[in-house]
Image: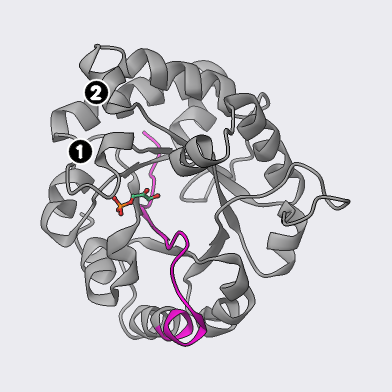
Amino acid sequence: MAMRRKLIAGNWKMNGLRAGGIALAGDLAGKCKAEAPNCDFLVCPPAHLLISVAEAIAGSGVALGGQDCHTAASGAHTGDMSAEMLADAGCGFVILGHSERRADHGESSSLVRAKAAAAERAGLTAIVCVGETADEREAGKALEVIESQVRESLPETAPETAPEAAGASLVVAYEPVWAIGTGLTATPSDVAEVHAHIRKLLVELYGNDTGSAIRILYGGSVKPGNAAELMAVGDVDGALVGGASLKLDDFWAIGRSCP
Ligand SMILES: O=C(CO)COP(=O)(O)O
């Protein structure tokens, strides 16, 4: 079985002004330098903080990511950022297809797939988000919805996988929409079922070696109090953390809970 080092990713969403954001990133970087963690840490701040956060985390091992990108490399797209611009700002990752973007901006799976291709073009690792709503879970359709999001949002061609790397240049995040920002989390057995299903699809789509190297994150109200239980579930290769990533001690504790 592929060894996948856990990835603890902080999605700051639309939170943080300069002073607080730079201090938070710098404090995380300081902790990582002082005490080599057992996991990879990633922070995804809002766009205006990317360059200063890149400076604050330089040399610490903490990675930087964007929260979205456009499909084009440049052009007349007011308000958008390209994957190339994120890379230029120091990003190695980009979150794509978050449920908030699917809902707030009407992003379809086919658009998310095109954005994933743009990320690959720019040398970024895409973190592609999937997840069912409460209604879909109650109707017994969770796996069906997740499967179609995986089949339609992920890149058509297999992502690159370096043999010695902890993962491939693609990450999938399972975030049940009803668990985001609500304090509700999926049960470990529901998480295990969904992650095993996603793993099966990844192996089917990309073959065993690549499909086994892709990290699958869980997201949705991950906190210090539930992280150890969630991170111990099979095929859970890390967490995509919203609210708790804005508090240094909580985010660090989530990383420390990785087995
Ligand atoms: O949406 C999320 C991360 O992308 C999860 O957010 P919360 O951790 O605040 O529930």
What x and y, as percent, mark residue 149?
49, 23
Q: Is residue 227 magenta?
A: no
Residue 134 appears in the picture as rendered: yes
Q: Earlier in the sequence, mark 1 or mark 2?
A: 2
The residue singled out by tag 2 in the image is 193
Residue 115 pos. (x, y %): 68, 39
x, y percent for residue 121: 76, 45
Which of 125/180 is in front? 180
Please tell me in which quadrant of the rendered image residue 88 appears: bottom right
Provide the residue span drawn in magenta: 1-23
In this rendering, position of residue 36 left or right of residue 207: left
Image quarter where the C terminus lies is: bottom left
Residue located 66% across and 69% down the image: 90
| Residue visible at 24% across and 35% down in the picture | 234
* Crowding at mark 1 (Cα within 10 Å: few <14, some 14-19, many 20+): some
Residue farthest along the right direction in this orientation: 75
Q: Residue at x 72, y 57 (%)?
A: 79
Tell me if the residue at label 2 has its CB under 8 Å from ligand 1.
no
Other-residue count near label 2 (Cα within 10 Å), few / some / many at <14 / 14–19 / ≥20: some
Front: mark 1 or 2: 2
Is residue 6 rendered magenta in the image?
Answer: yes
The secondary element bearing badge 2 is classed as helix
| Residue beneath disc 1 | 233
Relative to 141, 57 lies left or right? right
Q: Quadrant of the N terminus?
A: top left
